[in-house]
Image (tube, helix red, strand yellow):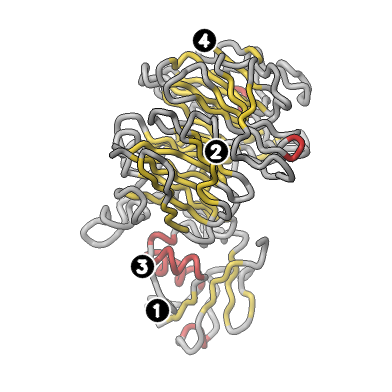
Amino acid sequence: MIRVVLPQHLRTLAHVVGEVQLNVNGAASLAAVLDELETRYPMLRGTIRDHDTHRRRSLVRFFACGEDISHEAPDLSLPEPIASGAEPLFIVGAIAGG
Amino acid sequence: MSGVRVLVGTRKGAFVLTADARRREWKVDGPHFAGWEIYHVKGSPADPDQIYASQTSSWFGQIIQRSSNGGRTWETPGFGREASADGMPKGESNKFVYDGVPGTHQWYDGTQHPWEFKRVWHLEPSLNNPDHVYAGVEDAALFESKDGGVSWCELSGLRKHDTGRKWQPGAGGMCLHTILLDPANEKRMFAAISAAGAFRSDDRGETWKPINRGLHSEYIPDPNAEVGHCVHRLAMHRSRPNTLFMQKHWDVMRSDDAGDSWREVSGNLPSDFGFPIDVHAHEPETVYVVPIKSDSEHFPPDGKLRVYRSRTGGNEWEELTRGLPQQDCYVNVLRDAMSVDSLDPCGIYFGTTGGQVYASAYNGDSWHPIVRDLPAVLSVEAQTLP
């Protein structure tokens, strides 16, 4: 089970409170987590990454175990504490504008 | 008793303002979608309780919202009651993908730049089918949904027009901001793009022609070019769909041949720069504009917020000031932020970047603020309710 913390606006859009818990089959990569997230909450498609290219939206960032992993290859395995559910994966809106 | 509902899009959410036909006491409901930019909210003429909203964010992209109960509750079409038996959505209501390879348009520095979808500026529900709605987007293109906003297809004949490579963004982006549907000819529609100009289709949006003859824009290399004009807004009266009014970057214009030719009707306006333009609900020659000082000073001349009304279809304008601030006022009124109701007397509404929404229940003769302290207002649409 993987825990994901969404930014407030996406929690509202997906009608969720608190963390999202996902079961990801196979290796827990960022891409696999986002695939599962968008399957469970299809209204989030296009809000985190492009519908078709899956390119990250430029003002969305991913943090795992205190590290910004936004620029890492999405198919790389996530750190063990994320994969095991010990720590959540953070999806955040970049600090930009007012 | 009939009433009025005013749909307001702002930089930080949507608001629904309601009143009875006297339009004295107003109820303010909102914010809906708090924290998101709401570029436009508009109800269906065929079913006023079916309302569409463009919810957008630089962070999280484009969302389409729809209400089927006059704005009390909202849903993202295709993700709620339309979901299939297995719970999966039937549509992708926030997916706007250009038809084919998008190609390029002119960039600020004169080079070619790829078309990139950014947001929906304007939603125009069809005149007779609540589930049929058009969307004008940035980078400029026209989309259509025939299933209540569940899915969207581009009417790509507009973007693929031969002149597309010459279109360029204005300061606000390259937006398709105006869509007018001809009530007398269901095949005819008009669109306006900043900064490309006005366009007309006579075959339900499949093919388009630029309709900019008579426009003169000194700020572009060829002031009389076929495209490249920064049209800010078009307006039409339902009873005279061949007569169009235009607020251009500079100049207020008029056409009496469905856009085939234009003539200037700025007349005695203190400034002919501005954004919105609208027509009285019952008097097709009565037109309203809000003069703004200049393209580099987006506020009213002399710090006085004045609506100007022409009862002669242009050229002769009278200032309307009663109830509006006449000193130290430095707000702007954006292109989609003026609307009229169809009661008698006609109600006129506009919103400002300072967060005020002003109403006149008397054809513009006098004004009062419905609400003073909203976020910057992006759009105002009035609905007359039975």
Tell me the chain of label 4: B
Which residue type carries mark 2? Trp
Badge 1 and badge 2 both on one subunit = no
The 10 Å Cα crowd at callout 2, few under 14, some 14 to 19, many 20 or more, is: many
Q: Are marks 1 and 2 in contact (CB under 8 Å)?
A: no
- How far apart are the alpha carbons under marks 3 and 2? 49 Å
Q: Please give the label number shown on residue B296.
A: none
Nearer to me, B287 or A30: B287
Tell me the SS state at disc 4.
loop
Nearer to me, B5 or B244: B5
Tell me the residue that label 2 is attached to: B367
- How far apart are the alpha carbons under marks 1 and 4? 61 Å
The 10 Å Cα crowd at callout 4, few under 14, some 14 to 19, many 20 or more, is: few
Tell me the SS state at disc 1.
strand
Q: Please give the label number shown on residue A40.
A: 3
- How far apart are the alpha carbons under marks 1 and 2? 53 Å
Residue B135 appears in the figure? yes
Tell me the residue that label 4 is attached to: B257
Badge 3 and badge 4 both on one subunit = no
Which residue type carries mark 1? Gln
